[in-house]
């Protein structure tokens, strides 16, 4: 069973409730809070991207800099700096946009979407950085670049092995993510443990390199006013990554970690819940955290309510 986690209050009236499951781990890797179905596998969606990037490093991919490694983990908004990084990565390994097997899309950022020409493109798709880095890894290893999405492709077999290693999740049937790649079901407990392993890994290891690249480039992995950007800017040392349909996971340098899934997948529940979790984890509260934790509900352009984590639950 899921648990009520976030509420929308309008004019003193509880208008909506978002339920889900959440786990918080102590530095020893054991749960200090477990609400809902934390041992049941979910599709982590893009929360898997850091683990996919670790696979690429383990298999010979060498980014030009931390920004290039960050774009390989990104759910980017398709803004000009994001597109430039993807195109630089493609060009560096002798590929062009046609080599990408993710679907064409428009930028998520409103300004970039308004200026997008000639329309949907593969490089605008939020997963295009990951796909470009996967092509680069195929080139490094002499693997076929056509059909790199296929579960049987050597690259995807390496991804499956890495995620199984980092999460300890038993192998099971795979799904297909929004970008066309295989997606591996993982429980929230094991997803949080994987993020803890990244945050506490030895400097220079693939796990730590990915964590450090994300910490140093929160805008690259997301975009203007994106949840991951705002949360990491407010919380130094945090490494985190959202996934579609209400998934989020992250860890602090001491190995404390969290993961959750909002049952209805609604984005408005994400930031209030993440901030409440960080507060529960002992993060020192600042004005930036307080502002993020209670986004307004508007009526006639004025604040008439709030979206908030339900008091006393997390």
Image: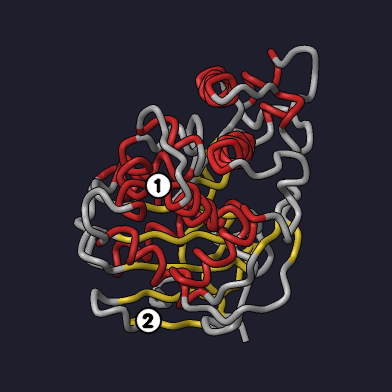
Q: Which residue is mark 1?
A: 292
Is any part of residue 99 visible from this angle? Answer: yes
Image height of 129 relative to 234, above or below = above
Question: Quick check: 218 left or right of 182?
Answer: left
**Residue at image x 24%, y 46%?**
236
Which residue is identified by label 2? 33
Q: Nearer the viewer, mark 1 or mark 2?
A: 2
Q: Is residue 260 left or right of residue 116?
A: left
**Residue 213 image point, x, y percent:** 35, 40
Residue 241: x and y in percent read 47, 52
Q: Quadrant of residue 115?
A: top right
Residue placed at 76% from the left, 31% from the top?
A: 105
- In this view, the residue in front, 167 or 204, is 204
Q: Which quadrant, please, contains the N terminus? A: bottom right
Give percent across and percent down for residue 159: 57, 59
Numbered badge on residue 207: none
Q: Secondary structure at mark 2?
A: strand
Crowd around label 2: few <14 · some 14–19 · many ≥20 (10 Å): some
Mark 1, other Cα within 10 Å: few <14 / some 14–19 / many ≥20: many
Looking at the image, which residue is at 25% across and 48% down? 204
């Amino acid at each position: 069973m899921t648990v009520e986690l976030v509420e929308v209050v309008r004019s003193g009236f509880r208008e909506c409730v978002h339920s889900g499951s959440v786990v918080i781990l102590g530095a020893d890797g054991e749960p200090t809070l477990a609400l809902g179905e934390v041992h049941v596998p979910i599709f982590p969606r893009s929360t898997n991207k850091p683990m996919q990037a670790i696979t690429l490093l383990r298999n010979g991919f060498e980014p030009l800099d931390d920004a290039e490694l960050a774009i390989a983990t990104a759910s980017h908004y398709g803004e000009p700096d994001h597109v430039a990084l993807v195109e630089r990565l493609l060009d560096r390994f002798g590929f062009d946009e046609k080599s990408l097997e993710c679907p064409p899309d428009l930028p998520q950022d409103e300004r970039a979407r308004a200026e997008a020409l000639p329309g949907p493109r593969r490089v605008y798709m939020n997963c295009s950085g990951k796909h470009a880095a996967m092509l680069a890894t195929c080139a490094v290893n002499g693997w076929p670049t056509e059909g790199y999405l296929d579960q049987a492709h050597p690259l995807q077999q390496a991804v499956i092995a890495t995620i199984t290693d980092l999460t300890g999740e038993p192998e099971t049937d795979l799904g297909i993510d929004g970008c066309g790649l295989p997606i591996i079901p993982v429980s929230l407990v094991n997803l949080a443990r994987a993020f803890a392993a990244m945050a506490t890994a030895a400097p220079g290891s693939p796990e730590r390199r990915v964590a450090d690249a994300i910490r140093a480039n929160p805008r690259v992995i997301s975009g203007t006013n994106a949840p991951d950007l705002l949360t990491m800017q407010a919380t130094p040392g945090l490494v985190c990554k959202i996934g579609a349909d209400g998934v989020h996971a992250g860890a602090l340098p001491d190995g404390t970690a969290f993961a959750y899934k909002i049952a209805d997948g609604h984005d408005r529940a994400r930031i209030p819940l993440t901030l409440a979790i960080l507060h529960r984890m002992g993060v020192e509260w600042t004005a930036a955290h307080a502002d993020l934790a209670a986004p307004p509900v508007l009526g006639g352009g004025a604040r008439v309510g709030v979206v908030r984590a339900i008091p006393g639950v997390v």
